[in-house]
Image (cartoon, rainbow, N blue to C red):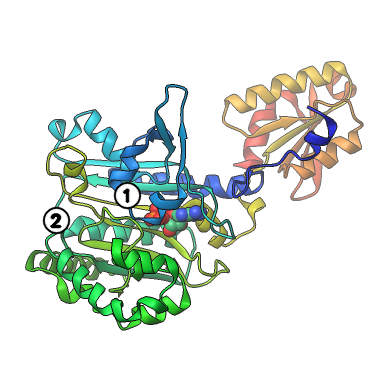
Amino acid sequence: MSGRDSEKLQAVKGMQDLLPPDSAKWGYVEKRARATFESYGYREVRTPIVEYTPLFVRSIGETTDVVEKEMYTFTDRDERSITLRPEGTASAVRALLEHSLPAKEPVTRWYYSGPMFRHERAQRGRYRQFYQMGVETFGIAEPTIDAEQIAMLVGLFGDLGITGLDTRINSVGGPEDRPKYRAALAAYLEPFRSQLCADCQRRLDTNPLRVLDCKHENDQKIVKGAPSILDHLGEAAKAHFAGVQAALDALGVAYTIDPKMVRGLDYYTGTTFEVRASGGDLGAQNTLGGGGRYDRLVQEMGGPATPATGFAFGLERVVLTLPGEADTFEPGAEVFFASHGDAAKLYCLKQVQNLRARGFRADLEHRNVGMKAQLKRADRVGARVVVIVGEQEMAANQAVLRDMKASEQRTIEAADLVAEIKRLVR
Ligand code: AMP
């Protein structure tokens, strides 16, 4: 590589590095989310980040933005078309069927976490590689599970300290309701055809429901007067949607019914939902997470009829909304050892290992620098206690213990070291 080329090294557009201390904030969200999902009985599934392309085309839908223009699709060395996953549900369904889960257990509850890829126009809150955490439930048709998932997502965001949440729910009806609504919507939109954006003029013919979530201001104005999907629901979908609302009310979850909220993926049937952040500076990218019911997908992918519900949230957007400076999420060291002389350094090296084995976050200065620089470093890593050992202390089997909070120090017997540290940091 020439010098010139190396100057230009940079991450792929729309993809970002995650460095400390921001990574600590991410880690915190991931940890809380895992704990929440596990408390509701979800177990982790990990699938590859690439799949054979037809899986996504068939499940997400040929006429969705994701499939039409956003997928990272390549021909691999076996001449097969593979795609970096743009979302998690398709892979979960594939894995469910590949491992015959429906025959083995009546209910499957999975959660996942990992990077997704969509070639979108990159901006704040919208990236080409982004991380999602999500859940899927297979085998439960009852509306209480839809409501429980919404409550779980809203509860998680609340626990994380995110305020001003706006929860929207809707029902896009079953496959038996859709054609009627599609026809009514197309009939309403047709007179506006020439005023719609170029994409929506095409969508009007291929998939008019997609016009509802067009981001263009003018299209949104036109959509305002469109017929409501809720007026076109059959009895089953209506009863289900009422059940979701009753369960949300019972759980005390606040929500708004938004008949225009259809979500960008074609596999949804019945309930759809989104949780948005009304505060913060995410602008148009303020949907933190969303999901819904997809009762037909497992069957369409070749499996047995299996009701299913799920959601995903975006880590980047949640972290951008989360209150608190990133460095306050870093645990820092509890104990830092500073030494003078080779023998003292080896002694400290051993003591630090001993403390780590007992569960303390302990560290020492490896570089041969003076005491002043070592104490400065102890301060930088946020140590609560500093242990100072020089030749004199070594000879006397002692150590100097400095309480950084109280700015006090005293000499203690080496044998009391662990007990004294424990007293100060625990
Ligand atoms: P979706 O899979 O489209 O239903 O999106 C679910 C959530 O994933 C959204 O609410 C966002 O938080 C997040 N998300 C989707 N696309 C992106 C993207 N390009 N960049 C960042 N986050 C995204």
Left or right relative to 230: residue 215? right
Q: Is residue 126 above or below residue 43?
A: below
Q: Residue furthest left?
A: 235
Task: Check the picture and name the quadrant holding the C terminus.
Answer: top right
Q: Describe the element under mark 1 as helix, strand or loop.
A: helix
Left or right relative to 151: residue 341? right
Q: What amino acid is labelled 1 in the image?
A: Ile
Viewer-closest of 280 and 49: 49
Viewer-closest of 130 and 78: 78
- C-beta proximity under 8 Å, tags 2 and 1: no
Label 2 vs 1, first from the N-terminus = 1
How would you rate the neighbour count of disc 1 (Cα within 10 Å): few for under 14, some for 14-19, many for 20 or more? many
Judged from the image, the quadrant occupied by ligand 1 is bottom left
The disc at residue 142 is 2
Where does residue 171 sit, x and y in percent of width and height?
22, 66
Q: Is residue 244 above or below residue 370?
A: below
Q: Describe the element under mark 2 as helix, strand or loop.
A: loop
Query: In this orientation, does residue 43 appear?
Result: no
Please name the residue shown 39% across and 49% down the image. 67
Please name the residue shown 50% across and 51% down the image. 315
Viewer-closest of 215 and 252: 215
Viewer-closest of 101 and 193: 193
The disc at residue 60 is 1
Task: Check the picture and name the quadrant holding the N terminus.
Answer: top right
Where does residue 325 sit, x and y in percent of width and height?
64, 57
How would you rate the neighbour count of disc 2 (Cα within 10 Å): few for under 14, some for 14-19, many for 20 or more? few
Q: What amino acid is labelled 2 in the image?
A: Glu
Q: Tell me the CA gap for discs 2 and 1.
A: 23 Å
Q: Is mark 1 within 8 Å of ligand 1?
A: no
Where does residue 293 sit, x and y in percent of width and height?
23, 55
